[in-house]
Amino acid sequence: MMKKLHIITPVKDSISTAQDTIHSIVSSDTTVPFIYTVYNDFSTDENTAKLKQLSASKQFELVNLSDVTSHPSPNYLLVLQMAQQKALADGADLLIVESDVQVDKHTIQALCEGARSMPGCGIAAAVTVNEKGKINYPYEYAARWGKTVVDNHKHCSFCCSLLTHELLSKFDFHDLDSTKSWYDVTISHKSLELGFKNYLFMNLPVCHRPHSSRPWKLLKYRNPILYYWRKYTKGLDKI
């Protein structure tokens, strides 16, 4: 029997790509019952108003983190903790789709079925590609793996990743390091440590436009020296 599914998208401005993400999710062909929540992480007033309009027309739940916390963005840890609590209470898996990703019509259904069919699955991740279908960040290392499902011992990015209910039940996200900004590496490693397997679905590509919500991170490619100087001197982007 297919489990329930909770889908979340954290949003920090970048309203154009966020709209594309939201549309791709609500337009999906799936028999899996899912609840979709967008977590608005201190977007501008203008973009918050647009998200509110979208939530009414697209029928997803909108959580404005400014109503929950005064902690400045990014609030990825809080989002993960809130989403885990809701998923566990509902007996659901948790699918994270970031706001610079577009899923295909059948991605969600296929990823759910894949997670159920693969033995001991902790995380089921879809490989990312650019608009031309070429594998891109953060999965360049998988470019030669072919169109198959890979037992992935490297970390899975949370661009489009399903965390199974079994994994959520074994690892409390309140135990994560609150000094970090992002947690895909930590949770991927913890999944393996707990005896689960993490699978990368090379046959389920999703379109990824990296760092659209935090364009300063594009410096990693244009000017890596400046990027790492900002990263370490300002304490940004802690993984």
Image (cartoon, rainbow, N blue to C red):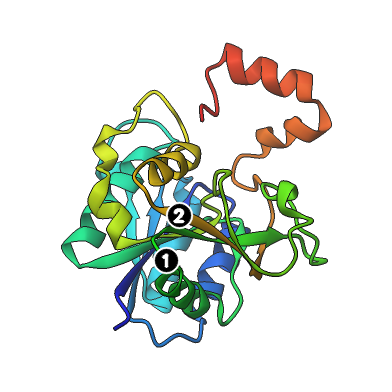
| Residue kind at label 2, given as amino acid type | Lys
- Between 116 and 48, the residue placed more toward the observer is 116
> Visible in this render: residue 59?
yes
Q: What x and y, as percent, mark residue 38? A: 40, 59
Circle 2 packing at 10 Å, graded few (<14), some (14-19), many (20+), is many
What secondary structure is found at the residue carrying circle 1? loop
68 left or right, relative to 148: left
In three-dimensional space, the C-alpha distance between marks 2 and 1, rounded to whole angstroms, equals 8 Å
- The residue shown at (68%, 15%) is 229
Any part of residue 65 in sight: no
Residues 100 and 120: in front is 120
Q: Is residue 177 left or right of residue 237?
A: left
Residue closest to the far left: 89
Q: Residue placed at 25% from the left, 61% from the top?
A: 87
Closer to the camera, 69 or 208? 208
Point 61% across, 76% down: residue: 104
Classify mark 1: residues with Cα within 10 Å, few (<14), some (14-19) or many (20+). Answer: few
Image position, residue 69 (x, y; %): 27, 37
Residue 42 marker? none
Mark 2 and mark 1 in contact? Answer it, CB < 8 Å. Answer: yes
Where does the image place residue 158, in percent across and percent down from the top left? 51, 51
Residue 186 lies left or right of residue 216; in this view the side is left
Q: Earlier in the sequence, mark 2 or mark 1?
A: 1
Q: Which residue was labeled with disc 1?
A: 119
> Residue visible at 39% across and 61% down?
120
Mark 2 element type: strand
Q: Is residue 103 above or below residue 231?
A: below
Residue 197 marker: 2
Return the residue found at the far top.
233
Q: Amino acid at mark 1?
A: Pro
